[in-house]
Protein backbone atom coordinates (compact mmCIF):
# COMPACT_ATOMS: atom_id res chain seq x y z
CA UNK A 1 0.00 0.00 0.00
CA UNK A 2 2.83 2.42 0.88
CA UNK A 3 4.51 1.79 -2.49
CA UNK A 4 1.20 2.42 -4.24
CA UNK A 5 0.70 5.70 -2.38
CA UNK A 6 4.29 6.79 -3.07
CA UNK A 7 3.94 6.00 -6.79
CA UNK A 8 0.64 7.86 -6.93
CA UNK A 9 2.24 10.93 -5.34
CA UNK A 10 5.13 10.85 -7.81
CA UNK A 11 2.74 10.64 -10.76
CA UNK A 12 0.67 13.47 -9.31
CA UNK A 13 3.78 15.62 -8.88
CA UNK A 14 4.88 15.04 -12.47
CA UNK A 15 1.38 15.87 -13.67
CA UNK A 16 1.40 19.12 -11.66
CA UNK A 17 4.78 20.12 -13.07
CA UNK A 18 3.67 19.44 -16.65
CA UNK A 19 0.44 21.31 -16.03
CA UNK A 20 2.36 24.24 -14.54
CA UNK A 21 4.69 24.40 -17.57
CA UNK A 22 1.72 24.27 -19.88
CA UNK A 23 -0.07 27.06 -18.00
CA UNK A 24 3.10 29.21 -18.02
CA UNK A 25 3.04 29.16 -21.82
CA UNK A 26 -0.68 29.73 -22.15
CA UNK A 27 -0.50 33.44 -23.04
CA UNK A 28 3.08 33.56 -24.36
CA UNK A 29 3.49 34.35 -28.04
CA UNK A 30 6.96 33.61 -29.40
CA UNK A 31 8.51 34.96 -32.58
CA UNK A 32 8.87 32.73 -35.61
CA UNK A 33 11.67 30.25 -34.95
CA UNK A 34 11.14 30.13 -31.17
CA UNK A 35 8.99 27.99 -28.87
CA UNK A 36 7.72 28.51 -25.34
CA UNK A 37 9.36 26.55 -22.52
CA UNK A 38 7.99 27.19 -19.02
CA UNK A 39 7.00 30.74 -19.93
CA UNK A 40 10.19 31.63 -21.80
CA UNK A 41 10.76 31.77 -25.55
CA UNK A 42 13.69 29.60 -26.56
CA UNK A 43 15.25 28.63 -29.88
CA UNK A 44 13.31 26.01 -31.81
CA UNK A 45 16.03 24.11 -33.71
CA UNK A 46 13.36 22.34 -35.73
CA UNK A 47 12.15 25.64 -37.17
CA UNK A 48 15.22 26.19 -39.34
CA UNK A 49 14.75 26.65 -43.04
CA UNK A 50 15.61 23.33 -44.66
CA UNK A 51 19.34 23.06 -45.23
CA UNK A 52 20.33 26.01 -43.04
CA UNK A 53 22.81 25.57 -40.21
CA UNK A 54 21.29 27.06 -37.04
CA UNK A 55 23.55 28.97 -34.66
CA UNK A 56 22.57 30.20 -31.19
CA UNK A 57 24.21 31.00 -27.86
CA UNK A 58 27.99 31.16 -27.29
CA UNK A 59 30.90 30.14 -29.48
CA UNK A 60 33.94 29.64 -27.21
CA UNK A 61 36.28 27.63 -29.44
CA UNK A 62 37.61 28.47 -32.89
CA UNK A 63 35.03 27.79 -35.58
CA UNK A 64 34.72 28.16 -39.36
CA UNK A 65 31.55 28.88 -41.35
CA UNK A 66 31.78 27.68 -44.95
CA UNK A 67 30.38 29.12 -48.15
CA UNK A 68 28.49 25.95 -49.10
CA UNK A 69 26.06 26.52 -46.21
CA UNK A 70 23.62 29.24 -45.20
CA UNK A 71 23.95 30.00 -41.48
CA UNK A 72 20.86 30.98 -39.52
CA UNK A 73 21.26 33.18 -36.43
CA UNK A 74 18.69 32.27 -33.78
CA UNK A 75 18.85 35.05 -31.18
CA UNK A 76 22.19 36.52 -30.11
CA UNK A 77 25.19 34.47 -31.19
CA UNK A 78 28.24 35.49 -29.13
CA UNK A 79 31.86 34.73 -30.01
CA UNK A 80 33.51 34.77 -26.58
CA UNK A 81 36.34 33.39 -24.47
CA UNK A 82 39.09 34.42 -26.88
CA UNK A 83 37.68 32.35 -29.75
CA UNK A 84 37.99 33.29 -33.42
CA UNK A 85 35.09 32.89 -35.84
CA UNK A 86 36.29 32.47 -39.43
CA UNK A 87 33.75 33.07 -42.21
CA UNK A 88 34.73 31.94 -45.69
CA UNK A 89 34.39 34.29 -48.70
CA UNK A 90 30.94 33.99 -50.28
CA UNK A 91 29.19 32.79 -47.10
CA UNK A 92 25.59 33.91 -46.45
CA UNK A 93 24.33 34.44 -42.88
CA UNK A 94 20.62 35.03 -42.23
CA UNK A 95 19.18 36.40 -38.99
CA UNK A 96 15.84 35.24 -37.63
CA UNK A 97 13.12 37.71 -36.85
CA UNK A 98 12.48 38.68 -33.23
CA UNK A 99 12.34 41.75 -31.00
CA UNK A 100 13.86 42.61 -27.64
CA UNK A 101 15.79 39.74 -26.09
CA UNK A 102 15.00 37.59 -29.12
CA UNK A 103 16.56 39.96 -31.65
CA UNK A 104 19.14 38.04 -33.66
CA UNK A 105 22.68 39.40 -33.85
CA UNK A 106 26.27 38.27 -34.16
CA UNK A 107 28.38 39.72 -31.33
CA UNK A 108 32.17 39.48 -31.19
CA UNK A 109 33.00 39.93 -27.51
CA UNK A 110 36.05 41.76 -26.22
CA UNK A 111 39.13 39.57 -26.56
CA UNK A 112 37.64 37.42 -29.33
CA UNK A 113 37.95 37.88 -33.09
CA UNK A 114 36.11 37.59 -36.38
CA UNK A 115 37.94 36.67 -39.56
CA UNK A 116 35.47 37.60 -42.28
CA UNK A 117 37.63 38.24 -45.34
CA UNK A 118 35.38 38.31 -48.36
CA UNK A 119 36.35 39.43 -51.84
CA UNK A 120 34.67 41.46 -54.58
CA UNK A 121 33.96 38.18 -56.37
CA UNK A 122 32.77 36.46 -53.16
CA UNK A 123 31.38 38.98 -50.63
CA UNK A 124 30.17 37.80 -47.23
CA UNK A 125 26.48 38.65 -46.82
CA UNK A 126 24.51 39.16 -43.60
CA UNK A 127 20.78 39.44 -44.24
CA UNK A 128 17.32 38.47 -43.02
CA UNK A 129 15.85 34.98 -42.91
CA UNK A 130 13.11 36.45 -45.11
CA UNK A 131 15.61 37.15 -47.91
CA UNK A 132 15.31 34.58 -50.73
CA UNK A 133 19.01 34.88 -51.64
CA UNK A 134 20.64 31.48 -52.24
CA UNK A 135 24.18 30.11 -51.96
CA UNK A 136 26.34 31.64 -54.69
CA UNK A 137 24.07 34.64 -55.28
CA UNK A 138 24.85 38.33 -54.65
CA UNK A 139 21.25 39.46 -54.10
CA UNK A 140 17.80 38.08 -53.48
CA UNK A 141 14.73 39.32 -55.32
CA UNK A 142 12.02 39.77 -52.68
CA UNK A 143 13.38 42.51 -50.38
CA UNK A 144 14.18 46.14 -51.25
CA UNK A 145 15.54 49.27 -49.57
CA UNK A 146 12.31 49.74 -47.58
CA UNK A 147 12.61 46.34 -45.88
CA UNK A 148 14.38 47.05 -42.59
CA UNK A 149 14.29 45.85 -39.00
CA UNK A 150 14.00 42.22 -40.12
CA UNK A 151 16.83 41.03 -37.83
CA UNK A 152 19.49 42.61 -35.60
CA UNK A 153 23.01 43.37 -36.77
CA UNK A 154 26.75 42.80 -36.36
CA UNK A 155 28.54 43.98 -33.19
CA UNK A 156 32.32 44.13 -32.62
CA UNK A 157 33.65 44.93 -29.14
CA UNK A 158 37.27 45.65 -28.23
CA UNK A 159 39.79 46.97 -25.70
CA UNK A 160 40.58 50.36 -27.26
CA UNK A 161 40.05 53.64 -25.40
CA UNK A 162 36.61 55.17 -24.96
CA UNK A 163 35.37 58.24 -23.09
CA UNK A 164 32.11 57.20 -21.44
CA UNK A 165 30.08 58.97 -18.76
CA UNK A 166 31.37 59.61 -15.22
CA UNK A 167 34.94 59.00 -16.37
CA UNK A 168 34.26 55.38 -17.24
CA UNK A 169 36.85 53.70 -19.46
CA UNK A 170 34.57 50.79 -20.26
CA UNK A 171 30.83 50.51 -20.84
CA UNK A 172 28.06 48.07 -21.74
CA UNK A 173 27.00 48.05 -25.36
CA UNK A 174 23.41 48.94 -26.18
CA UNK A 175 21.01 46.01 -26.31
CA UNK A 176 22.93 43.67 -23.99
CA UNK A 177 21.73 43.29 -20.37
CA UNK A 178 24.07 44.79 -17.77
CA UNK A 179 24.75 41.42 -16.14
CA UNK A 180 26.03 39.87 -19.38
CA UNK A 181 29.81 40.31 -19.37
CA UNK A 182 30.12 39.72 -23.10
CA UNK A 183 28.59 43.18 -23.65
CA UNK A 184 31.55 45.05 -22.13
CA UNK A 185 33.80 47.19 -24.35
CA UNK A 186 36.63 49.70 -23.91
CA UNK A 187 40.05 49.57 -22.29
CA UNK A 188 43.55 50.99 -22.69
CA UNK A 189 44.85 49.41 -25.91
CA UNK A 190 44.26 51.55 -28.99
CA UNK A 191 46.08 48.94 -31.10
CA UNK A 192 43.66 46.19 -30.06
CA UNK A 193 42.76 43.63 -32.73
CA UNK A 194 39.16 42.36 -33.11
CA UNK A 195 39.89 40.67 -36.44
CA UNK A 196 39.04 41.32 -40.09
CA UNK A 197 35.95 42.56 -41.93
CA UNK A 198 36.44 43.00 -45.68
CA UNK A 199 33.89 42.85 -48.49
CA UNK A 200 31.02 42.36 -46.07
CA UNK A 201 27.44 43.42 -46.85
CA UNK A 202 24.94 43.83 -43.97
CA UNK A 203 21.31 44.09 -45.08
CA UNK A 204 17.76 44.66 -43.75
CA UNK A 205 18.68 44.80 -40.03
CA UNK A 206 18.03 47.05 -37.06
CA UNK A 207 15.50 45.03 -35.04
CA UNK A 208 13.98 46.78 -32.00
CA UNK A 209 15.67 45.72 -28.74
CA UNK A 210 13.97 48.23 -26.42
CA UNK A 211 11.77 51.33 -26.46
CA UNK A 212 13.29 53.63 -29.09
CA UNK A 213 16.41 51.45 -29.25
CA UNK A 214 17.31 49.51 -32.37
CA UNK A 215 20.49 47.71 -33.37
CA UNK A 216 22.84 49.41 -35.81
CA UNK A 217 23.89 47.61 -38.95
CA UNK A 218 27.49 47.57 -37.74
CA UNK A 219 28.29 48.54 -34.15
CA UNK A 220 31.94 49.15 -33.20
CA UNK A 221 32.54 49.47 -29.45
CA UNK A 222 36.11 50.24 -28.36
CA UNK A 223 37.54 48.65 -31.51
CA UNK A 224 41.27 49.26 -32.05
CA UNK A 225 43.56 49.95 -34.99
CA UNK A 226 44.74 46.34 -35.11
CA UNK A 227 41.35 45.52 -36.62
CA UNK A 228 41.11 45.58 -40.42
CA UNK A 229 37.82 47.01 -41.72
CA UNK A 230 37.35 47.88 -45.38
CA UNK A 231 34.77 47.43 -48.15
CA UNK A 232 31.74 47.36 -45.86
CA UNK A 233 28.14 47.90 -46.98
CA UNK A 234 25.18 48.52 -44.66
CA UNK A 235 21.89 48.82 -46.50
CA UNK A 236 18.26 49.19 -45.37
CA UNK A 237 18.98 49.26 -41.64
CA UNK A 238 16.22 50.58 -39.40
CA UNK A 239 18.60 52.53 -37.13
CA UNK A 240 22.12 53.86 -37.82
CA UNK A 241 24.25 52.38 -40.54
CA UNK A 242 27.58 52.31 -38.68
CA UNK A 243 28.03 53.57 -35.11
CA UNK A 244 31.38 53.90 -33.32
CA UNK A 245 31.44 54.01 -29.52
CA UNK A 246 34.96 55.27 -28.90
CA UNK A 247 37.81 53.20 -30.24
CA UNK A 248 40.41 54.02 -32.85
CA UNK A 249 39.81 51.62 -35.75
CA UNK A 250 40.18 52.99 -39.26
CA UNK A 251 37.40 52.23 -41.77
CA UNK A 252 38.02 52.41 -45.51
CA UNK A 253 35.51 52.09 -48.35
CA UNK A 254 32.30 51.98 -46.30
CA UNK A 255 28.92 52.39 -48.00
CA UNK A 256 25.72 53.12 -46.05
CA UNK A 257 22.50 53.22 -48.04
CA UNK A 258 18.85 53.82 -47.12
CA UNK A 259 19.30 53.81 -43.35
CA UNK A 260 16.41 54.77 -41.09
CA UNK A 261 18.41 57.04 -38.78
CA UNK A 262 21.99 58.34 -39.10
CA UNK A 263 24.37 56.96 -41.69
CA UNK A 264 27.55 57.36 -39.63
CA UNK A 265 27.25 57.98 -35.88
CA UNK A 266 30.29 58.74 -33.71
CA UNK A 267 30.21 58.69 -29.90
CA UNK A 268 32.54 58.57 -26.87
CA UNK A 269 35.47 60.21 -28.64
CA UNK A 270 36.08 57.85 -31.53
CA UNK A 271 39.57 58.74 -32.77
CA UNK A 272 39.89 56.80 -36.01
CA UNK A 273 39.43 57.70 -39.68
CA UNK A 274 36.69 57.05 -42.22
CA UNK A 275 38.28 57.30 -45.66
CA UNK A 276 36.53 56.93 -49.05
CA UNK A 277 33.06 56.40 -47.57
CA UNK A 278 29.73 56.87 -49.31
CA UNK A 279 26.21 57.53 -48.06
CA UNK A 280 23.00 57.38 -50.11
CA UNK A 281 19.55 57.86 -48.63
CA UNK A 282 16.06 59.22 -49.23
CA UNK A 283 13.40 60.73 -46.98
CA UNK A 284 13.38 57.74 -44.62
CA UNK A 285 16.84 58.60 -43.30
CA UNK A 286 17.79 61.18 -40.68
CA UNK A 287 21.34 62.58 -40.95
CA UNK A 288 24.51 62.04 -42.93
CA UNK A 289 26.64 62.36 -39.81
CA UNK A 290 25.92 62.61 -36.09
CA UNK A 291 29.09 63.28 -34.16
CA UNK A 292 29.58 63.50 -30.39
CA UNK A 293 32.86 63.93 -28.57
CA UNK A 294 34.13 62.64 -25.22
CA UNK A 295 31.57 62.22 -22.45
CA UNK A 296 34.08 62.95 -19.67
CA UNK A 297 37.70 63.96 -19.09
CA UNK A 298 39.08 60.42 -19.44
CA UNK A 299 40.66 59.68 -22.84
CA UNK A 300 39.33 62.96 -24.18
CA UNK A 301 42.06 64.04 -26.61
CA UNK A 302 41.37 61.82 -29.62
CA UNK A 303 40.23 63.39 -32.90
CA UNK A 304 38.06 61.78 -35.59
CA UNK A 305 38.71 62.21 -39.31
CA UNK A 306 36.18 61.84 -42.13
CA UNK A 307 37.73 62.47 -45.52
CA UNK A 308 37.50 61.81 -49.25
CA UNK A 309 33.86 60.78 -48.97
CA UNK A 310 30.59 61.31 -50.85
CA UNK A 311 27.19 61.95 -49.28
CA UNK A 312 23.95 61.95 -51.27
CA UNK A 313 20.46 62.80 -49.99
CA UNK A 314 17.88 62.34 -52.71
CA UNK A 315 15.47 64.72 -50.97
CA UNK A 316 17.82 67.69 -50.28
CA UNK A 317 17.37 67.49 -46.52
CA UNK A 318 20.69 66.01 -45.45
CA UNK A 319 22.32 67.34 -42.29
CA UNK A 320 25.63 67.03 -40.47
CA UNK A 321 25.09 67.24 -36.71
CA UNK A 322 28.17 68.36 -34.75
CA UNK A 323 27.03 67.74 -31.20
CA UNK A 324 28.49 68.20 -27.73
CA UNK A 325 32.31 68.41 -27.75
CA UNK A 326 32.63 67.02 -31.26
CA UNK A 327 36.31 67.28 -32.18
CA UNK A 328 38.02 66.32 -35.40
CA UNK A 329 38.03 67.02 -39.14
CA UNK A 330 35.68 66.69 -42.11
CA UNK A 331 37.67 67.30 -45.28
CA UNK A 332 37.53 66.84 -49.06
CA UNK A 333 33.96 65.50 -49.03
CA UNK A 334 31.25 65.92 -51.66
CA UNK A 335 27.71 66.60 -50.42
CA UNK A 336 24.56 66.47 -52.52
CA UNK A 337 21.36 67.59 -50.84
CA UNK A 338 23.06 68.93 -47.70
CA UNK A 339 20.69 71.45 -46.11
CA UNK A 340 22.84 72.52 -43.15
CA UNK A 341 25.52 71.77 -40.62
CA UNK A 342 24.20 71.90 -37.06
CA UNK A 343 26.80 73.20 -34.61
CA UNK A 344 26.10 72.74 -30.90
CA UNK A 345 26.52 75.53 -28.36
CA UNK A 346 24.88 74.36 -25.13
CA UNK A 347 24.29 76.09 -21.81
CA UNK A 348 23.66 75.27 -18.20
CA UNK A 349 20.02 75.22 -17.17
CA UNK A 350 19.94 79.01 -16.89
CA UNK A 351 20.57 79.55 -20.65
CA UNK A 352 23.25 82.04 -19.60
CA UNK A 353 26.35 80.11 -18.58
CA UNK A 354 27.91 78.52 -21.69
CA UNK A 355 29.38 75.02 -21.65
CA UNK A 356 32.50 74.03 -23.54
CA UNK A 357 31.02 72.61 -26.70
CA UNK A 358 31.45 72.02 -30.43
CA UNK A 359 31.07 75.75 -31.09
CA UNK A 360 34.05 76.56 -28.86
CA UNK A 361 36.18 73.95 -30.62
CA UNK A 362 35.17 75.29 -34.04
CA UNK A 363 36.19 78.90 -33.35
CA UNK A 364 39.31 78.04 -31.33
CA UNK A 365 42.76 78.76 -32.75
CA UNK A 366 44.11 76.27 -33.49
CA UNK A 367 40.74 74.67 -34.13
CA UNK A 368 39.81 71.31 -32.59
CA UNK A 369 36.89 70.99 -35.01
CA UNK A 370 37.30 71.84 -38.69
CA UNK A 371 35.10 71.50 -41.76
CA UNK A 372 37.33 72.37 -44.66
CA UNK A 373 37.74 71.93 -48.41
CA UNK A 374 34.34 70.31 -48.91
CA UNK A 375 31.92 70.75 -51.77
CA UNK A 376 28.80 71.33 -49.67
CA UNK A 377 26.62 73.34 -52.03
CA UNK A 378 26.89 76.43 -49.85
CA UNK A 379 25.12 74.79 -46.89
CA UNK A 380 24.87 77.03 -43.83
CA UNK A 381 26.74 76.30 -40.62
CA UNK A 382 23.89 76.89 -38.18
CA UNK A 383 24.61 77.43 -34.50
CA UNK A 384 21.92 75.83 -32.37
CA UNK A 385 21.64 76.08 -28.63
CA UNK A 386 19.92 74.28 -25.77
CA UNK A 387 20.20 73.95 -22.04
CA UNK A 388 21.94 70.81 -20.84
CA UNK A 389 19.23 69.71 -18.42
CA UNK A 390 16.81 66.91 -19.24
CA UNK A 391 14.31 69.28 -20.83
CA UNK A 392 16.81 70.48 -23.48
CA UNK A 393 15.09 73.88 -23.50
CA UNK A 394 16.06 75.95 -26.52
CA UNK A 395 18.19 78.97 -25.59
CA UNK A 396 18.67 82.18 -27.60
CA UNK A 397 21.81 82.21 -29.73
CA UNK A 398 24.31 84.64 -28.22
CA UNK A 399 24.93 87.70 -30.39
CA UNK A 400 27.96 87.21 -32.60
CA UNK A 401 28.03 83.40 -32.48
CA UNK A 402 26.57 82.93 -35.96
CA UNK A 403 28.68 85.72 -37.45
CA UNK A 404 31.89 84.18 -36.10
CA UNK A 405 30.99 80.74 -37.43
CA UNK A 406 30.01 82.06 -40.87
CA UNK A 407 33.33 83.87 -41.25
CA UNK A 408 35.35 80.73 -40.45
CA UNK A 409 33.20 78.47 -42.60
CA UNK A 410 33.36 80.78 -45.61
CA UNK A 411 37.14 81.06 -45.35
CA UNK A 412 37.72 77.31 -45.13
CA UNK A 413 37.42 76.56 -48.83
CA UNK A 414 33.98 75.03 -48.63
CA UNK A 415 31.43 75.12 -51.48
CA UNK A 416 34.38 74.39 -53.73
CA UNK A 417 35.69 71.42 -55.67
CA UNK A 418 36.29 68.23 -53.73
CA UNK A 419 37.07 64.80 -55.12
CA UNK A 420 34.93 62.89 -52.64
CA UNK A 421 34.88 59.09 -52.78
CA UNK A 422 36.05 56.76 -55.50
CA UNK A 423 32.70 55.03 -55.99
CA UNK A 424 34.18 52.26 -58.14
CA UNK A 425 35.12 50.59 -54.83
CA UNK A 426 31.41 49.80 -54.34
CA UNK A 427 30.63 48.56 -57.85
CA UNK A 428 29.40 45.06 -58.68
CA UNK A 429 29.59 43.46 -55.22
CA UNK A 430 27.26 45.65 -53.13
CA UNK A 431 23.47 45.30 -52.96
CA UNK A 432 23.22 49.02 -53.77
CA UNK A 433 25.21 48.63 -56.98
CA UNK A 434 23.63 45.37 -58.11
CA UNK A 435 20.14 46.84 -57.68
CA UNK A 436 20.98 50.25 -59.24
CA UNK A 437 20.14 52.20 -56.08
CA UNK A 438 22.88 54.84 -56.13
Image (cartoon, grey):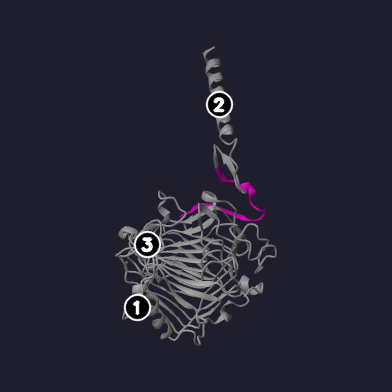
Drawn side of residue 409 relative to residue 100, left or right: left
Of labels 1 and 2, the one closer to you: 1
Question: Could you tell me if residue 189 is visible in this image?
Answer: yes
State yes or no: discs 3 and 1 in contact (Cβ < 8 Å). no
- Identified at 50% across, 55% down, the residue is 212
* Mark closer to the chain start, 3 or 2: 2
Report the residue that reaches farthest toward the right. 141
State the CA–CA distance, disc 1 to disc 2.
Answer: 72 Å
State the CA–CA distance, disc 3 to disc 2.
Answer: 59 Å
Tell me the magenta residue range. Answer: 41-60
Q: Which residue is mark 2?
A: 16
State yes or no: discs 3 and 2 in contact (Cβ < 8 Å). no
Q: Which residue is mark 1?
A: 363
Q: Residues within 10 Å of mark 2 (few under 14, many from 20)?
A: few
Q: Nearer the viewer, residue 341 or 384?
A: 384
* Mark closer to the chain start, 1 or 2: 2
Label number found at residue 387: 3
State the CA–CA distance, disc 3 to disc 1.
Answer: 20 Å
Q: Nearer the viewer, residue 262 or 233?
A: 262
Amino acid sequence: MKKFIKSTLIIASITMVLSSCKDACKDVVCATGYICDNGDCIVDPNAAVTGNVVKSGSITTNETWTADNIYELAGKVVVDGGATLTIEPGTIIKGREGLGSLASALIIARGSKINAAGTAAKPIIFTSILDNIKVGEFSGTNLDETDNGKWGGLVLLGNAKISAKVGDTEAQIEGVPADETYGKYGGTNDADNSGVLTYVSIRHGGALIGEGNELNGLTLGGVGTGTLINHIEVVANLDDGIECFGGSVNVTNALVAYQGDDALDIDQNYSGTFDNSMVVYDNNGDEFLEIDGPENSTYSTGLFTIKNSTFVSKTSDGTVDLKSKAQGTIENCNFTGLSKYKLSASYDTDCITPKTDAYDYFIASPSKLSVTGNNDGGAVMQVYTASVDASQVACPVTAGYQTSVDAIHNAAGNNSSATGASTTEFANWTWTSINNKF
